[in-house]
Every structure is written in C-alpha cells, then in structure tokens.
Amino acid sequence: MSYREKFDASEERAHYQNIATKILRELSDLRSRVESSPNVSKRWIWELIQNAKDVHIGGRVKVRIEVELDGDDPHVTFRHSGQPFSADNIRFLIEQISTKDRKKDETGRQRTTGKFGTGFLITHLLSEVVTVQGIAKEPGLPYRGFDLLLDRTGFDLEEITEAVKTAKQSVEDLDDRPTSGAYVSGAFNTAFRYTLTDALSRKVAKAGLEDLDICLPYTLVFVREIESVEVSPRSYSLAKGTPVLPEADVAIVSTLVQTARSPKDTASHLLAVLRKGFTTIAVPVSVSGDVVTLIRPGPDVPRLFCDFPLLGTEIFPFPVIVNNPNFNPTDPRDGVFLTTSQRINPLSEENKAIIREAVALYLDLLNHASDNSWDNLHSLVSVRPAPSTLTWVDASWYKNDVLTPVRRSLLHAKIVRTATDNLASILSDDGQKFIWIPSGSKKQLRDKIWLCCSSWFPSQLPTRSDVEVWYEIAWEDCGKLTVATVAEFVEKAGTLSALAEKLVAGTDVHGWLNEFYALLRLDEDEYDLLINKRSLFPNQNGDFRKKSELYRDAGNIGEPFKDILKLLGDDLRAELLLAEVDAGLDDLEVRDQVYAVKEITSSVQDKANDREVAKSFRPAFRKMLLWFRDNKARANKLFPVLYRQKHLLYDDEEISENIERAEQLGALLTEYKVGTVDQLRAVLAKQLDRPALLPITEEILASMGITSVAEWTEALKDKDVAVLFSHKSTPTTDMFVYAQSLIARAKEAILAHLRALENYDVTGAEETAPTVFAGIFKDGRELTVVARPAYDGEVIIYYGSERDVLDFEDSELWVDDGAQPRRVTLGHLLKTTQIRRFPV
C-alpha cells in the first residue's frame, strides 16, 4: 500500500472516529440526564418540528405526529410536508453534522433555526434506532425514495463507527434505485419512526407531547411557516385569516385546537401580541364581550423563544413571553447568552439588545392594557431579580437594564384594581405610597388586614380577590400594609373623632376598633410590642393612649365624680379605657369608686385649706356642693369629713354673693306672694308662656267652631280661653253668620277630600256635633273625624265634645286652610308648638 493510500485510509478512520466520538459524547450526556433533567425529555418534539420548519415549501409546512404508546407496536412517527432530502441532508443526518446556517437573510432574520446537528441526537431518547423514510432530490437528478436506519445503540466508538458506516452504505446505491413517483409537493413525504422499546421511551414520548400542548400556541404565532400540527385526534393551527402581526400595535391572535372526531369541538388559545422588528412579546388572555382578561403564563411555559421554546427559561423572571429568531441560545438551548465579560461578546450583546427591545414592548403593552381597563393587570407585574441558577444571565446587568427600569415604570402605571373597582397606581403623582398591599405571615392575617382597612381607605387597597397575587409580587418600593402599619395609622389619627372622620361613612368607629384589636391579637409575633409601644387605645376623652397609660373602669365611679376630678385638675377620664371598645386588655389595673372618692377627698382637702388656691377651683367645689345637696345620705357616707366641713368649699366672695342672692330671692317671693322657689317658678313660667291678647275675628270664631252668641258666652266661662282674648272687642251677629259659612265650607272641603282617598269611605258619614262626623271608615275601621277651618292658620279646641272624641284612638283631626285639607297629627303638634315635655 502506498503512502497516499495509507494517508487516505488514515483520514477516513479519523473522520469516522471524530463522528463517533461526537455522537457518543453527546449520547452519553443525554443518557445520563434524561431521568434527572426536567427539560431533556421534552426537547425531542421541538427538534423535529424545528427541522420541518427549516425545509418549508413556499413558507408553509404541515406536521403530523402519529403516536401509539401501548399495544403490540408502540411507536412515535413524525411526518412533515417539507422539501425532499438533498445528498448533504442525508449525509449530515447520518454523520450528525449540522446544516444550520446562522447567516441572516436580506431582512436580517436568521436563515434556519437548526437541522440535523447534535440537537437531533436528543430524539434518540425516544428510540436509539430510528427509521427514516424520505425522498431524495438534487437539481438535475430524479426523485429517489429511500429508507435509512440510524442505529445509536452502541456504547463504544467501534459500535457507533460501524453503525455510521452501515447507514452510509445503505444509501450508496441511491442512483441505482427506481425513480420515485411517489413525491407529491405538500404531502407528508418525510417520516421519522421511533419504536418505543421500554418505559423510559414512553415517558419521554409523553413529556414531549405534553409540552406540545403548553408551547405550541406560542410557536404557531411566532413561526408562521408552520401551517398546522396534527397529533391524532387533535389538530393545532392559527385561526383562518390571521394576518401578519402589525408592528407596534397590540393584536389578539387565536390558536385553534380542533378534534378530528368532532370538528365542531374546537378550543382556542388567545394571545395578546406586540411586535417590533423581529422581537415579539406575547401573553395569554381571555375575551368576553368587550372585556379582555390577562392570564399569567404558567410556570411551565418558557419565557424565551428562538422561534421555538428554549426549555429551561421557565424561571427567567419576565412576565411575558419573548421571541426573536436572532437570539443566540446556549448549546443545550436552555437559555440565551446574557453574560458580561471583559472582552466584548457580540452574541451576548445582541441578546441584551433584544431583551431591552422586549422591555420597551412590554411597557407599551402594559400601558395599552391599563388604558383599556383590561382585567388582571397584575399578571403583567411579576418582574423579579434574576435567580442565581440562571448561569447564562449577568444578574447585575439584568437588574440595571431590566428590573429597575421596569419596576420604576410599574410604580406609576395604573395597574392596581382597587376595592372601589378603579384602576390606580402604586405610587401617587408626588411619589408617595398610595396603594397598600396587605402583608403578613399568614393568608388569614392578610385577609383580616384587608377587611379591617376596607372600611378606612378602600380606594387604596387592591380588590380582595387580588390580595394574594399582589402580596406575592410586591417589592420594596410598594406600600406593604402590615399589622404594624395599620397600628401606625391608628396612632397617627390621634383621637377617636379623627379616626371616625377617616372611616367610610356609616362605619361604627367602636366596632371598627374592635375588629382592629382582633387583628392585633392574630399577629402573635408583633402583638406584645405593638400594644406596649404604640398609642392605640382610646381613653374616655377619645384620645389614643398606650396600654401602660390606661386603667379599666369598674363602672361604678359615676360621671359627676369624673367631672369633679377634672375640675380639680386630675382628669380621670384621660386614664380610663373607653368602655365601648373590646381591646382585650383584661390585665389592666382597675379604677373604681373607692379610688375616685379617695382622690377627690385628698385633692379637695389640699386645695380648700389655702383660700387663695381655693378660688381657682370654685367650679369644682360648687359641683361638689350640688352633689352633696342632691345626695345627702351618700355624701355623708362617702365623704364624711368633707360633708361635715362643706363650709370650707365656699370662699368669702362666694359667701357674700350667696347672701346677696338670698336677699334678692326673698324679695321676689314677697313680691309674687309665694312661699317657695317652686311656686315662684310656676308663676313666672305662666307669665312667660302667656300669649298676646287676641282680637275677636270671624276667622277666630270659625277656628273655635263657635256659631252663636250663646256658644261664645259659654266659651268665655273657660278661664284658659277667656284669658286669650281682649275684652275691648265684642263679636257681632254678622261675625257669627260669617263664622258659620267658614265652618260649613271647611266641612264640605274635608269630606270631598276624604272621598278622593282610596282608604277612606264617607258614604255613611253622620254629623254628631257641629264639627264632628261619625260613620266614616278608614281601611275598614270605623273612624270619628273632627273637621275645622284654619283659614287664619290656627285652631282653638274649645268644645268638650271635640276633646272627648280626640281622646279616642279611632279619631282624627282634619283642617282646611283654604289650600288643601290636611290631617293634624300628634307629631305636627309637637313640632309646631315645640313641646318637649308633658305629663302622662
């Protein structure tokens, strides 16, 4: 053998060894990770769809996946309608060499996503033996059908090498095979068949198919070359007529899932999509009428797509899905390079630029959703620091270029649906915290915080159903409403009245405080600190005080004693807990009547002994003396010393004033010829209540119901009536005649009015006295009606018959004032006469 021949033989061996080494290395890594990695077992489906997309015809390709997990022939067969194989395709498939062309086309888009590289090896996790059925076609050569067996079962270089050689030899006679007439453009001409040989194969198959349901709605939107994907009995596709996504305009795109058994049984996945250039963002939504509701992408949805899902980016902390075909992914396609190094890395810099573009699109989508009052805006807010497990992300860069600018914008966007059903921003226009998010260690505690404060500032709380979501996504700049924060707000109110003004109208401030104290007790960690540190409990003056500054009221002190102590400069109410609240402070020391008596006695004795000092406390001493006067027996028992020495409670000036008043009182008693103060009071009251004397007119006579001289003479026998009228005026005969006409007019008007009322029946009305009717029925009950004119605005009840009638329950007084007959009720009398007190 010549040297040339040896060189050629050595080159061939090296070539096959390199191929086998790469295949074995990649397979060994995949075999070791298939059961531990959550992503490896799902990638096979996307590698196959990705390869199908790269051989689309005229921008369209269909995919069909046949699955049989059980039975005699468990398998997965992947078919597509793409272009036939070239000679290079077949060779690269055998040797696992990528035909991926990362060069960009004239528009700037990557030409292909990837084909037959090491990524294809992952499909061997379904089966290490794959049968490929396809049609070969080269320019100028006829179509040739072929079957190719790819065997990757080997565990050493020799086995892999021989398998590669065997596969290559199986297609070397392609030129000698019959010309294929089976190729039909757009038909499923290519198939990859994987026999599922064990439980692990079936597990991998299920994982990929399940991920198809999760990610395919996004992929169909991002990759328009994929016309449909069939996985019997379902078929996935975009809704018919879906246009190319407009740039910089939010569109809602529908992905359909149709069942072959029942074409009418069609479900849809809706995505809100926004695009600029090659960068697209998407988030799931639902639509009902005019209401669009945002849906947070599930935790199993990758956040980054390079046309196809980059499995492993599920924890990338961004609230929407980002796609760009020009992403530069990591080799296992589980992320994109977003690292920073001393030397510029063009791949990483391009990825960072794409992410920054996605951030701008995200903020545009957020503003659009807010402006149009979409529901569940909180679904767009979950932006967190990059976790340390994302080794392909520079956490510092992410914080500066993504997290901080996004959160800064979120603080001022109207994204919080409040308890008053309005949209509000987390911060106010002046940068102060506006929205308060209930926060605490337990869900029950957070809910109680919301309930408590919903009666205080509902417009600054998220709606109750969103509390847990906002608790989860709130960051340090957000207003976090802890029990301690609520306590701080209560303390700042300062007084019970100020707090009441802040609460929603109609809220009982005492009931609200009781809820607040129940909330305090729920926070076991902070309870003791809060009740001892903060002024949260109202004293009996309505001022909030600390627990250590208060005592419980035994309930037997009495308000007079509290008043006296306050006048003495010792405000006991300031130390007593308000009885109307249930603060749960059962361990407080009690203040009772014994304590109050002791304090009063001590204070009065101290101040009364110094006559100059006593002058300053005259109101207290006076109130004490009045209480002594009204409670002599109790005064002698409770204050024996003070009661005996009560003269000390008067100062010299007061004694002089009292003597002078006593002399004046004696003179008044003599003047009014009475013996007691009560008798004097009665005389004065009668004089104050006496009205001015009335002239006698026709209207007054009518208002009294008097129609003759005899009736007038009889009326004047009543001293209470006679005292009302001037004796200088005398009624004439003409006055009585006119009074009769007024009375008749009033009775007629009142009866006519009652006939018009549905619940009155006057058909049997009978006049039993000049102004009294019997036989009238109201709601089926017999009624007696007194009818009087009131043309001068007054009625004077004179007749005893009228008074007797009106004393019964089934009677009514009706008057006619010339405008509208109306009933005079007891309430009307009380209001117009301002009667506050009367004997019963």
Image (spheres, rainbow, N blue to C red):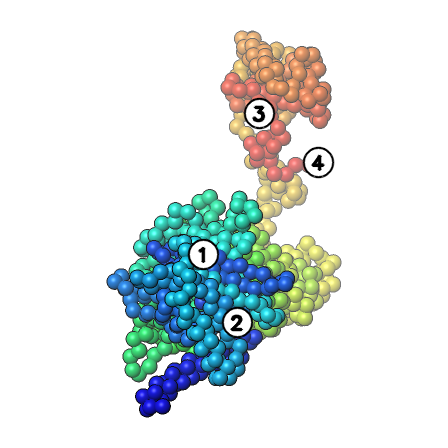
Q: Nearer the viewer, mark 2 or mark 3?
A: 2
Residue 326: x %, y % from top left: 33, 67
Give the answer, above or below, for where 498 lies relative to 92: above
N-terminal label among 1 and 2: 2
Side of 716 where 96 appears, left or right = left
Residue 634 at x, y percent in the picture: 73, 59
Label 2: how many residues lie within 10 Å, few (<14), some (14-19) or many (20+)?
some
Q: Residue at x 51, y 84 (%)?
A: 156
Query: Who is closer to the viewer here, 21 or 114?
Result: 21
Badge 3 is on which residue?
724
**Disc 2 residue type (three-letter):** Val
Q: How crowded is mark 4: few (under 14 residues within 10 Å), some or many (20 or more)?
A: few
Residue under label 1: 188
Does the residue at mark 3 contact the one at mark 4 (Cβ under 8 Å)?
Answer: no
Q: How many circles with numbers are drawn on the protein?
A: 4
Local SS, label 3 = loop
Task: Give the labeled residue for mark 4.
Answer: 840
Q: Picture quarter containing residue 182?
A: bottom left
Q: Where is residue 110 in the image (x, y as percent from the top left)?
A: 32, 66
SS state under label 1 = loop
**Mark 3 or mark 1, which has the lower sequence index?**
1
- Which percent across, then down, holds residue 586? 68, 68
Q: How far apart are marks 3 and 4 (CA)?
A: 25 Å
Give the mark nearest the N terminus, 4 or 1: 1
User: Disc 1 residue type?
Assistant: Phe
- Give the CA separation, mark 3 to mark 1: 117 Å
Q: Which amino acid does label 4 sit on?
A: Val
Q: Name the residue under label 2.
A: 129
Residue 567 visible in rendering: no
